[in-house]
Amino acid sequence: MRAPKHVLVIGSGLAGINAALLASDFADVTLISKSSLEQTNTQRAQGGIAAAITLLDDPEIHAADTIRAGAGLCDPLAVATLTSEARAAIDRLVGLGVQFDQRTDGHPALATEGAHSIPRVLHAGGDQTGLHIQSALIQRLEEARVNVRTGLTVADLAIDAGRCVGAVTDKHETLLADAVLLATGGAGALYRTTTNPANATADGLGLAARAGAVLRDPEFVQFHPTALVGDDSAFLISEALRGEGAVLLDANRNRFMPAVHPDAELAPRSVVARAITESMRAHDSDHVWLDISHLDADYLQQRFPGVYRGALERGHDITGGPIPVAPAAHYHMGGVYTDVDGRTTVRGLYAAGECASTGAHGANRVASNSLLEAAVFSARAVNAIRNHSAPADQPTGVVRSLRLHPHCSAPTFKSLRAAMNQHVGITRDAHGLKSVLSQFDEWSGTSSSDPSLALATLSARLITEAALQRTESRGSHIRLDYPDVDPAWQRSSLWQLARE
Ligand code: SIN
């Protein structure tokens, strides 16, 4: 069988560019980016990329750590695929020109982060791993035979007889393709307070939903425990600081994590975010403190140049004392359902990176597994595209069908983000979630000339519907009205839009 001739990739982070480069070996590739190529979550990633690459480590240990943190919802096959293909993914990045930091003996410098039982996080430029990866990818893209279109929003996927055959842009242009890969990134910018860039508005989730694809666990939005408090574009303070010994202090400057979990500040991210949220509530404060100032100032500036400069620009010196931090929307574990080959349930449509839900993260992603997921599964998706794969099998479990108007829109991003921040954040309850759903109903007569806002509204609604349905507190979120884990809920939630 001949390889497909035209491949369309939507998104320019690690998953998108890696896929475009690989697909350009056998197809004409068009890569669309909503903004500039650099405005991605990849570019902002600080901590690094996890991989079991030393003799002391093993992909199976990495898999066990990932599953332990995933709060009962990881798919073991997806996790095993992720961790066993990590070394190949790192080798490919190095081949593309990424220079990971090294120790003086020439071996990779490996950091520790929450829930990893062993140091396995490769990093570049200290805490500027994403920047280094993004720059290398863009350089390779400039040399490759890829048609790059920036500043173009996909308004809808083109579907013909149930098959995805391309995409329609906001300029009313139809781009036909034999295969379409969604690599649109995350959902953090559906919230007012987020570590993500403003364009991370879950376009892929909305596009796939409209195309009839199955979605998984949209309710699982991860809130990073430590974003600098000050403005809504919450500056990320990497978990790698806690890996180097930073401690969390409550409003009275007392350390609280040792009483919460044996791994203290390096407990799984969901545990730390929840403990911080509870401490803030107990002290009626909008932040806790993060302190790493006991380490040598020169060392901190060299190990964390990005965090040091970013915090200083915002009026805080990490070398001088504790800085105020609080959780902020950071990563979407839920997304477009895919199998381990990036196949969605719609023929011709693939997804990789943060917009996909491979099942590798369960209900709580482990730090530095996201860049890895983007690298591993984008490559696998391109293999599946090359082989003209059939769509993914329907997942096991009940798929809940939702009848929604897929094109209605919040009046502005500001109103949408305010509603999500207030009621669909790390703490939720039925009352607040229902009030947001009523708000969506009120907006159902509104349409927008901005296709991205309509997609964001649909994605936000899906997150809210799923958050209301999950009557328990698992992984990344706390249901105030259902504070415990419910064993009956140890399953993914699966969703699909009903045909209009
Ligand atoms: C961090 O550096 O803490 C963020 C990295 C991640 O989310 O994996």
Image: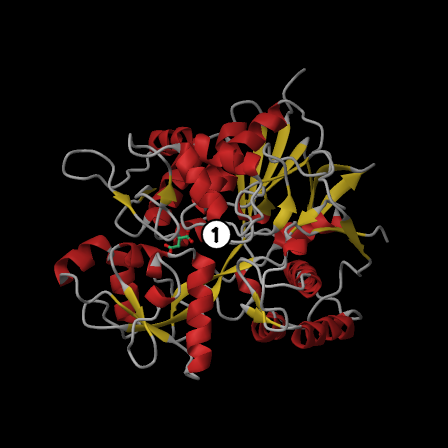
Q: Amino acid at mark 1?
A: Ser
* Residue 420 placement, left or right of 444: left
Q: Is residue 390 left or right of residue 428?
A: right
**What residue is shown at x 54% (from left), y 30% (from top)?**
380
| Residue at which label 1 appears | 36
Number of residues whose C-alpha sits closer than 10 Å to that of mark 1, classed few (under 14), some (14–19) or many (20 or more): few
Can residue 238 be seen?
no
Which residue in the rendered view is the most extreme toward the right? 500
Q: Quadrant of residue 316?
A: bottom left
Q: Is residue 453 visible?
A: yes
Residue farthest bottom in this picture: 284
Q: Determine the secondary structure under disc 1.
A: loop
Residue 132 in picture, x, y percent from top left: 33, 45
What residue lies at 49% left-to-right and 41% top-to-bottom? 374
**Where does residue 453 sit, x and y in percent of width and height?**
65, 63
Snapshot quadrant of residue 51: top left
Horizontal side of 353 relative to 344 (left or right) equals left
